[in-house]
Image (cartoon, rainbow, N blue to C red):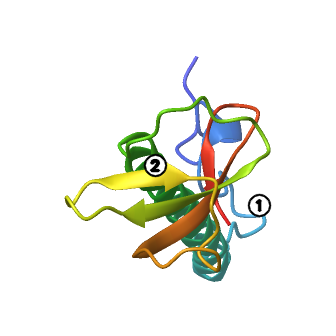
Amino acid sequence: MEKPDNVADNPGILPYGSNIGAPAIKLENIGGWKQKNVEKVNKRIVQRYQELNEEIQKLVQEYEINQLVYGAKFNFEPVVGEIYHLYNGKDGISFLSLISPTEWNQPYIGSFKLDSENKWIKI
């Protein structure tokens, strides 16, 4: 059977009307929607990147503090929760002490407390 020239084989999937009386199909401009959402997503990504960067900086600082204190000389087993003071020794080697800087005239580095995870925290 022969079809007339103005009839399509698959009118339901055409990107345009298949006959003269069909409504005009207009593609919407979604450029504004895309731009708005790109800006939102990029803002979230930048914020998350900054949060992760701050977290990394905090971890690096914790690592450096623990390296400093665990690398010091001490001849006792520190107690969790107690405050200890770190000094520079005359021989250039740092050491940990219970004596506070107000009671002693030594080159003082800082005060630290051992937490329950055996991690040193600067006071």
What is the three-letter code of the residue carrying label 2?
Val
Compared across the picture, whether 105 is left or right of 115 comes to left
Residue sitting at x 26%, y 54%: 93
Residue neighbourhood size for the residue with mark 1, other residues' Cα within 10 Å, grouped as few (<14), some (14–19), many (≥20): few
Residue sitting at x 31%, y 61%: 89
Relative vertical location of residue 63 with respect to residue 57 in this rendering, above or below: above
Compared across the picture, whether 59 is left or right of 83 comes to left
Q: Disc 2 marks which residue?
A: 69
Relative vertical location of residue 101 with respect to residue 15 in this rendering, above or below: below
Compared across the picture, whether 27 is left or right of 2 comes to right
Residue neighbourhood size for the residue with mark 2, other residues' Cα within 10 Å, grouped as few (<14), some (14–19), many (≥20): many
Spot occupied by residue 28 in the image (x, y as percentages of width and height): 67, 73
Residue sitting at x 64%, y 39%: 13
Between discs 1 and 2, the one toward the N terminus = 1
* Quadrant hosting residue 104: bottom right
Label 1, label 2: how many angstroms apart (C-alpha)? 81 Å
Spot occupied by residue 46 in the image (x, y as percentages of width and height): 54, 71
Q: Nearer the viewer, mark 1 or mark 2?
A: 2
What is the three-letter code of the residue carrying label 1?
Ala
- Provide the secondary structure element on which disc 2 rests: helix
* Quadrant hosting residue 73: top left
Compared across the picture, whether 72 is left or right of 102 comes to left
Q: Disc 1 marks which residue?
A: 22
- Provide the secondary structure element on which disc 1 rests: loop
Residue sitting at x 47%, y 46%: 66
Quadrant (top left/top right/bottom left/bottom right) for the N terminus: top right
35 or 82: which is nearer to us? 82
Cβ atoms at labels 1 and 2 below 8 Å apart: no
Spot occupied by residue 50 in the image (x, y as percentages of width and height): 54, 69
Relative vertical location of residue 57 with respect to residue 43 in this rendering, above or below: above
